[in-house]
Amino acid sequence: MKAGGFVILNIDTVVIAQAPRLMPYLDRIRARLAKTIGLEEKAVNIKVKTAEGLDSIGRGESIAAQAVCALLKEV
């Protein structure tokens, strides 16, 4: 991505997990993700939700994540 001249402006993430409860760890997860990617923490948004008991996520057998990022092409 960097070789192509793009920079990440921000990231919005959703983690879907029945267990473990991730809310107590959100600040640490945000800080680590921001550091890994090279962003300020305010540019990283993380939300957590459950699967309401549905499918393998709801049974606690798996975890899913979705992420969207805004990119800027440097000129």
Image: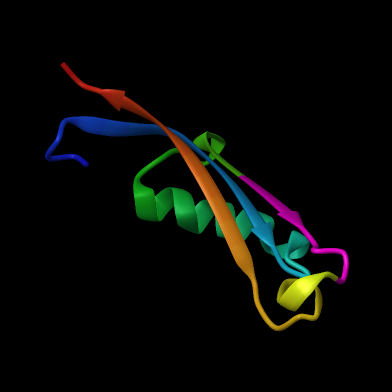
Looking at the image, the residue that sits furthest to the bottom is 61
Q: Is residue 50 a member of the stretch shown in magenta? A: yes
Residue at 72%, 78% in the rendered image: 56
Q: Is residue 26 left or right of residue 4?
A: right
**Front position in the image: 36 or 46:** 46
Placement of the C terminus among the 4 image quadrants: top left
Picture layout, residue 73 above or below residue 31: above
Q: Is residue 48 left or right of residue 71?
A: right
Residue 20 visible in the shown view: no
Residue 8, position as x, y percentages in the image: 36, 35
Image quarter in which the N terminus is found: top left
Identify the coloring: rainbow
Q: Is residue 8 visible?
A: yes
> Against 63, is 46 above or below?
above
**Residue 65 x %, y %:** 58, 59
What residue range appears in magenta? 46-53
Identify which residue is drawn at 40% across, 40% down: 39
Give the image location of residue 50, x and y in percent. Answer: 80, 62
Report the residue that reaches farthest toward the front: 55
Q: Is residue 16 above or below residue 34?
A: below
Q: Residue furthest left?
A: 3
Residue at the farthest right position: 52
**Residue 61 in which image quadrant:** bottom right
- The image quarter in which residue 73 lies: top left
**Number of disc labels:** 0
- Residue drawn at x 16%, y 30% is 5
Whether residue 47 is situated above or below residue 68 in the rendered picture = below
Q: Residue at x 52, y 48 (%)?
A: 67
